[in-house]
Amino acid sequence: MRNITFIGGNGFFGKSFIDGFNRGLLKKFKIKKIYVIARKPENLKKNKRLNLNNIKLIRGDIGRIKKLPKTNLIIYGAERVAKKDNKNKDKIINEHKKSINNFCKLLETHKKCKVLYISSGAVYKNKNNKHKDLYSYLKNYSEKKIMNITNKNIMTSIARCFSFVGPWLPLNQHYAIGNFINDGINKNSINVKANQKVIRSYMYSDDLIYWLTKILMSSKNKTSIYNVGSDKPIEIRKLANIIGKIFHKPVKSSNISNKKIEKYVPNIYKTKRNLKLKINYNLIKSILLTINHINAKIN
């Protein structure tokens, strides 16, 4: 049996991982226990619908802790900056670098282990590694740090994650699908804010955590990089219409220009081929499962 350390447990990835583990989704990997490092573990304890069986919560900031739990499987999912957060740049950059640098330093004294760094598809938008897009710049920085520590004892992988939907998705942040579901749950019209053509794709969280675990287990002494997400594109207004029909609500949108198209859809051919992975949940099923779970939490 194996134990995993998950760094950054309060976000969508951490909660989805805890939830999926305790529903038996990772049984194939023989995971016995998960150690979750979080700055505010009490937030997880307060969530009555989150099963914390076989979860060891550890209060800590990855930029400041002195040691890691003695597990040979580690997932780094901590976030220091949101995608739209470009304020207080210097402070954010320093904190993010302090976190990943301390993590890498701790790994130097760790026994043989496999490490998965959760990155983002946003790195493809910032190939020159400039500060203009803070989120992608810092993801690029961390990826390089992870690659540099890779050796025969520290085997690493990087998951460049795209867009997702699932029970633990924040509804009031910058995720369009979460905003649309939030509109419907609150019995409002589905509001499309985009003024240009936007194309996205969405993977369900159960597929996500299975893929992440498979990538983690495949880690070798040369860093492998895999895209994670759905390769089925959907235009954002069509997505809004689907959710509008589910809630029986109209869709409101401004005039959208087709001169500029924003597309954020991964190529997952390599991931599926190399790791023999597949997508089990289509978009409609993913949305319905998410809504049902959120409604259960509310009621």
Image (cartoon, rainbow, N blue to C red):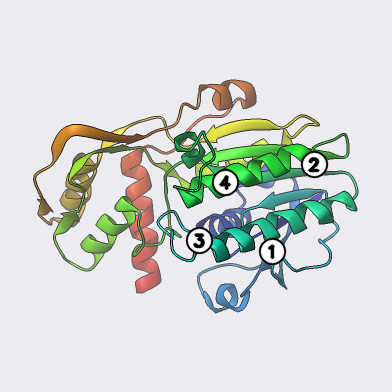
Relative side of 196 to 104, left or right: left
Left or right of 176? Residue 159 is right
- For residue 46, which quarter of the picture? bottom right
Tell me the mark number nearer the camera, choosing from 3 and 1: 3
Distance from the alpha carbon under mark 4 to that under mark 2: 16 Å
The amino acid type of the residue labelled 2 equals Ile
Residue position for label 2: 149
Q: Is residue 82 visible?
A: yes
* Residue annotated with mark 3: 89
Give 88 or 226, whichever is nearer the viewer: 88
**Between discs 4 and 3, the one toward the N terminus:** 3
For label 3, the SS is helix
- What's the amino acid at mark 1? Val
Query: First in sequence: mark 3 or mark 2?
Result: 3
Of marks 1 and 4, the one in the foreground:
4
In 3D space, how far apart are the residues under numbered discs 3 and 2 (Cα atoms)?
26 Å
Q: Are marks 4 and 2 in contact (CB under 8 Å)?
A: no
Mark 4 and mark 2 lie on one chain; the one further toward the N terminus is 4
Disc 4 target residue? 139
Label 3, label 1: how far apart the Cα atoms are: 28 Å
Element carrying mark 2: helix
